[in-house]
Amino acid sequence: MNYYLDVLKKYADFSGRARRQEYWMFVLFQIAAIIIVSILDAVLGTSPWLYALYALGTLLPNLAVAVRRLHDLGKSGWWLLISLVPFVGGIWLIVLLATAGQPQPNQYGPDPKVLAA
């Protein structure tokens, strides 16, 4: 939960780097939140309005943490567009997001793992 709140504090901060743990814990909490919001939508009969509001409200944090994760690899945030390539683009993006970051400082900042220690 702390990772989720930390990402929300950096709501639209596309600069810097994000560790794998920060990114994937955020994704895990997002999945849980989406399931809960979808169930609420179904129970209240407001489908898909609550889900749409939640998705819209968390669009920028999702993009920001993904861009910061790519920065940790030394790649530009524009690499997110690789997911638009049919069939392999999404898989390639998941592989990139799961890859270990650069241990040394890069053009996007110092290693966040060292800063967290």
Image (cartoon, helix red, strand yellow):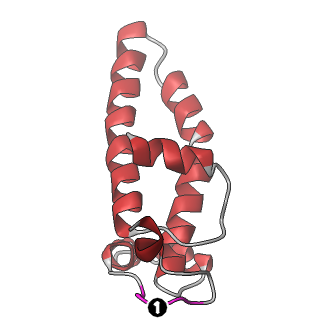
Position of residue 105 measured from the top left corner of the image (x, y, whole percent) = 53, 88
From the top left corner, tell me how far across and down residue 75 is, in percent.
54, 86
- Please, is residue 82 above or below residue 4 in the view? below
Q: Position of residue 12 (x, y in %)?
A: 68, 54
Q: Which residue is mark 1?
A: 104
Q: Name the amino acid type tagged 1.
A: Gln
Q: Is residue 17 above or below residue 5?
A: below
Residue at position x 31%, y 73% in the image: 98
Q: Quadrant of the N terminus?
A: top left
The residue at the point 46 percent across, 84 percent down is 73
Taking depth in this image into account, of 89 and 7 the one nearest to the observer is: 7
- Say which element carries label 1: loop
Quarter-wise, where is residue 76 in the image? bottom right
Question: What secondary structure is the stretch in magenta mostly built from?
Answer: loop
Point out the stretch of residues depicted in magenta. Answer: 102-106
Up the image or down, 46 lies above or below 85; here it is above
The outermost residue toward the front is: 117
- Crowding near the residue tagged with mark 1, few <14, some 14–19, many ≥20 C-alpha atoms within 10 Å: few
Q: Residue at x 38, y 17 (%)?
A: 40
> Across the whole image, how many numbered discs are drawn on residues?
1
Q: Where residue 26 sits in the image (x, y, percent)?
A: 40, 50
Task: Looking at the picture, tell me which residue is in the foreground, 22 or 27.
Answer: 22
Q: Is residue 61 magenta?
A: no
